[in-house]
Image (cartoon, rainbow, N blue to C red):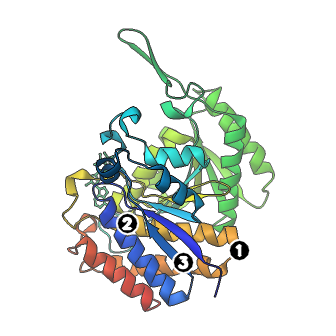
Amino acid sequence: MPAPLTVAVLPGDHIGPEITRAAVLALEAANETYGLNLRFEEHMVGHASLQAHGTTLTDNVYTAAVEAAGILLGPCDNGGYPAPKDGGINVPGKFRHDLDLYANLRPSRSHRNVPHARPGLDVLIVRENSEGFYPDRNMFEGYGEVMPVEGVAISMRKITAHASNRIARSAFEWARRRRSHVTVVTKKHIFRMTDGLFYNECAKVAAEYPDVRWNSSIVDAFNADIYMNPDRYDVVVMTNLFGDIISNLCSALAGGLGLGGGVNAGVSHAMANASHGSAPDIAGQDKANPISMVISGAMLLGWLGQKYGREDLLATEKAIERAIDRVLESPETRTMDVGGYASCSRSAAAIADAIRQKI
Ligand code: ATP
């Protein structure tokens, strides 16, 4: 029996608990089927925690999550939380910042039979996660936007050689595990300093990976080309905001936002987190697509497999992907957003069954 690994399960808000339950169901099925010795510890965060404890993230839950081997976090309604002084802590933001989860990895793969999917898409978006335009992630922490005079607002974007270099390295490492190709997406001919710096660091890293082919693309042209020629791309690395936008585009090209999984990875920690939001419009109706969260959970196992050198976890990530492919084949087991008529819980049960059957 391998050494035990604890996964902290934090269900989040709105559809968060429904799709996180689905992910745990899948991971438990994998745990039993492949003898992984995973332990799941569920803790309350978000609105539920705010109501019960006056804060969206208590110190106890924070500590338990940081001490776990990995974190499985459902989508959170950060925009709907009160100010931090009133208990509204940005839950993913707090972990991302404190644990330096600098790489946001978001895969998109089109599946046969899923309506709207662009055939041939199989990409991994590697999104820089620690700086960029985001007001909470630049040198003026919390003050990345200013209004010097009424009617004029300025947004500031921080790009460093250090963060660009390490995200580029992450992209080239991932490319080695995939189809050995990286596309660097920028708008460097306009943002010569910021995107120029990002691009130069990517080019430096590329020189250390002669076995990985790479090219550079301007973000607007890339947007059109990923639709027209999805099969040209493998790993795509970009700065934070571009990565946020383009990963949603890629989820849609794969068939829908409900397929968008992801993991926020650092050196010592990783947090699985769907790439979409908490979807309040469909919450509590058992109709959310659970696949985004199941993919995120599978990626967390893959990350743990790399970290601890555990082949069984790496193989389980692939086994879960095969189970997802199977469930997406039939409208009876797909949810509505991807052209099926299954409920969230029905689709989740079908994924867990497929894992148990070692499909
Ligand atoms: P938030 O405020 O948390 O960002 P949002 O509704 O503004 O939430 P998303 O949660 O990303 O943004 O949702 C965008 C659209 O995609 C919504 O119509 C939502 O119902 C749909 N959607 C998001 N996730 C899923 C899912 N897992 N399954 C089905 N539909 C989804």
Badge 2: few (under 14), some or many (20 or more) residues near its Cα, within 10 Å?
A: many
- Rendered location of residue 238, percent (x, y): 57, 44
Q: Which badge, 3 or 1, comes first in the chain's sequence?
A: 3
The answer to which of 82 and 328 lies nearer the viewer is: 82
The residue furthest top is 149
Residue linked to disc 2: 20
Q: Which residue is mark 3?
A: 38
- State the CA–CA distance, disc 2 to disc 1: 26 Å
The answer to whether residue 225 is above or below residue 263 is: above
| Residue 84 located left or right of residue 63 | left
Q: Which tag, 2 or 3, sits closer to the chain's start?
A: 2
Numbered disc in front, either 3 or 1: 3
Kindly identify the amino acid type of the residue bearing the numbered disc 3.
Leu
Q: Tag 2: residue type?
A: Thr
Disc 2 versus disc 3: distance between alpha carbons? 16 Å
Q: Amino acid at mark 1?
A: Gly
On the image, numbered disc 1 is attached to which residue?
A: 309
Question: Where 221 sits versus 357, above or below?
Answer: above
Of 142 and 6, which appears nearest the observer?
Answer: 6
Q: Quadrant of the C terminus?
A: bottom left
Q: Looking at the image, which residue is at 66% across and 37% down?
A: 198
Q: Position of residue 178 (x, y in %)?
A: 63, 67
Q: Residue at x 43, y 49 (%)?
A: 57
**Percent of width and height locating residue 5:** 59, 73
